[in-house]
Amino acid sequence: MATISGIPARRSALRLIDAVLRRGETLEQAENAAFGDLEGSADRALARAIASETLRWLTDLDTLIDSATKKRLPDDAKVRSVLRMMLVQTLRLGTPAHAVIATGLGLLSAGPRRLAHGVFSTLTKRDTALPQAPTMPEPVAMRWGDRAIQIAPGLVDPPEVDLALKQPGESGTRALDMGGTTLAPGHVRLPRGTPIEQLPSYGEGAWWVQDLAAQIPPRLLGPGEGRRALDLCAAPGGKTLALAAAGWHVTALDMNGRRLQRLRQNRRRTGLEAEIVKANALTYVPAKRFDAILLDAPCTATGTCRRHPDVLHRIGQRQIAELVELQRELIARAIGWMEPGCVLVYAVCSLEKEEGEDQAAWIDATFDLKPVPVTAQELPAGIEPTPAGHVRTHPGMLADKGGLDGFFIARWEKP
């Protein structure tokens, strides 16, 4: 029997969702196995979109499904995941109902197929709709508290494309030429789905892809003026490029060879200079003095939830606690290399207090460093430092302009 057109992409989407919810994998980690029988890039993109939107709206999709069943379906039941996918295609992706039914029911055997058809029909007849913003999974809502309500509007859609410019003074011109907008000097925002490598200016090397929030940490070190900076945990390299463009002599350290390759590629394309070192920061011994250290530490990455909605379902207290310990080891290493006058910027793309505010308090209590408060003038318009002089961004900020990732950033100087 011939396979109904579109079923392989839906089957791959189902595998992606299963890998995240059952095994705690990231969508990126799961793609190779999930896409095994897909031939074209269009099918891969469709599978990825279905899985991402399902995970983005999972709590609300489950609420709808539960409203149409007499007995609650198990969380890990295949029919529940298929129904989630069917609903998200109808409510978010604009897929025609006949295609949703044919490709969704084709993933199920006889009994579950009848159940899914009945539930889907019941919900579509009700003129069902999703809320204005996604509802957070209960563990996430408990961790984030009142902030969850503020963050949710920033998760409605995947993010647009942010570029960091080698020459900040070109922001207005570049934005106009590319059909984008600018929210800060050195920043251009382009529409979602812009094919980056096909942009006419790609070969010029005048910019690289980097979220607006991720552009903040290197800016807080100011102009390099030939001084030395260490970018710890540097790959894939956006902050290294930003420091080099600002006149720093940069040493970029990371232990991930594949991600460092991306840095090398962007370094060649942009023509910027940086020393790249493949090493474990926990055993690395610097051979020279640095005037500044940027530690963008490994973290839960919950701040990237608008582009990686799987983090809302994979991360819990165990992962947070493990990463807090690793971050403290890295912080202690970095501080041990600081000479008087050296500046440290600590950053994480996390929305977890333990990885941000609590780590800053630990640094203040443990080490002889002088906090250097961040000022409003150093930040993009619409973002204010916290009363403690730190930076805390989240996806709900600047939501009317497309939002930004969640980051915590703080700065100190060695007396």
Image: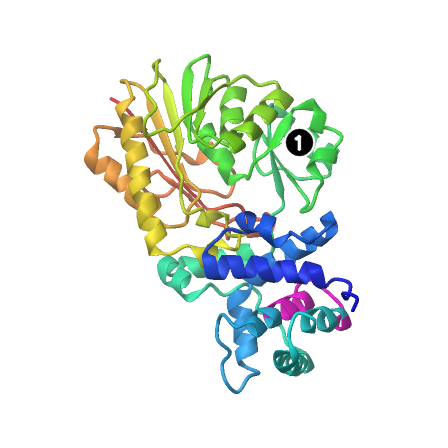
60 displayed left or right of 161: left
Q: Residues within 10 Å of mark 1 (few under 14, many from 20)?
A: some
101 displayed left or right of 386: right
| Vertical comparison of 228 with 3: above or below | above
Please, which colouring scheme is shown? rainbow
Which quarter shows the N terminus? bottom right
Span highlighted in magenta in the image? 84-98
Q: Residue at x 53, y 70 (%)?
A: 60
Q: Is residue 168 visible?
A: no
| Vertical comparison of 292 with 215: above or below | above
Q: Residue at x 74, y 35 (%)?
A: 198
Q: Is residue 92 magenta?
A: yes
Q: Residue at x 29, y 21 (%)?
A: 338
Total of numbered circles in the picture? 1
Amino acid beneath label 1: Gly
Residue sitting at the far bottom: 70
Q: Nearer the viewer, residue 373 or 99?
A: 99
| Vertical comparison of 252 with 103: above or below | above
Q: Quadrant of residue 131?
A: bottom right
- Secondary structure mainly formed by the magenta segment: helix
**Helix, strand or loop status at disc 1:** helix
What residue did someone put label 1 on? 172
| Vertical comparison of 68 with 386: above or below | below
Give residue 400's position: percent from left, percent from top.
59, 52
Which quarter shows the C terminus? top left
Give residue 215's position: percent from left, percent from top.
51, 34
Q: Nearer the viewer, residue 309 or 183?
A: 309
Q: Is residue 227 magenta?
A: no
Q: Is residue 114 visible?
A: yes
Give residue 35's position: percent from left, percent from top.
64, 52
Q: Nearer the viewer, residue 372 or 344?
A: 344
